[in-house]
Amino acid sequence: MKTVHYFLLGVFVAATAAAQPIYETQGKDGPVFSDLPGQGRDVPSPGTTELTLPPINVSSPPPAAPPAESAPAAAAAPYQSLSISQPEGGGTIHSNTGQFTVQVAVDPALRVARGDVVMVSLDGQELAAKRTTTQFDISPAEWQMAAVDSVEHQLQIAVVDRSGVVLISSEPVRFYVHRATRGR
């Protein structure tokens, strides 16, 4: 932008200078050029000649390039697979509080930078917390909120984008929870 301003200033100065006569006088060290016909006077000094300059060669600046349209972000390849590797289908976990670790396998890797997250459903109840990793714990509070009062439970996960659209879902995994009891 500064270049354009300097260019316009130069054109203005050149146009103004072209409208005024230029005088040449011989000095002791060579020619002296001035816009006054004499030394500070409007009357020509002896030996002063008015110069006739050719017209100013002014060219127009090249047209500005149109702003580059931002290319649409390359659509990422869709998720190919999503599965729960822990707890194992038909397996048993031991937990008195309901806390246990979930391990998820997703291909390609979870795109957290795009806003994709893992949504978890326990016994048909969607858990409030969304996960940004493929290994996480179900907390005792989540267990108390969602788990049914049974020995058999079901876990299912989905990858959702930032607007909540399901991109891929896993098959549900059925597992058992064993709670230690104290004998009498």
Image (cartoon, rainbow, N blue to C red):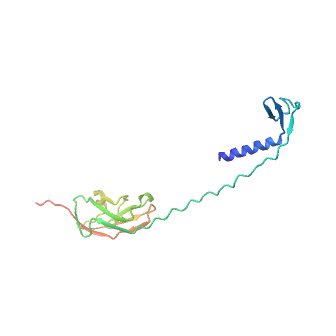
- The image quadrant of residue 147 is bottom left
Residue 62 location in percent, x, y?
A: 69, 54
- Image quadrant where residue 105 sits: bottom left
Which residue sits at x=77%, y=43%? Answer: 14
Task: Please determine whether, in this image, residue 155 is positioned above or below residue 133.
Answer: below
Can you tell which quarter of the image residue 10 is in?
A: top right
State left or right for residue 95 relative to residue 3: left
62 and 76: which is toward the camera: 62
Percent coordinates x, y for residue 129 in the rendering? 36, 58
Q: Is 141 drawn above or below residue 46 in the view shown?
A: below
Residue 174 spot, x, y in % from top left = 27, 69
- Marks counted in the figure total 0
Q: Nearer the viewer, residue 122 or 108?
A: 108
Tell which of 153 and 6 is nearer to you: 6
List x then y, in percent, for residue 115: 44, 59
Left or right of 64? Residue 44 is right
Q: Quadrant of the C terminus?
A: bottom left
Left or right: 90 as drawn, with respect to 62: left
Name which residue lies at 51% across and 62% down.
Answer: 73
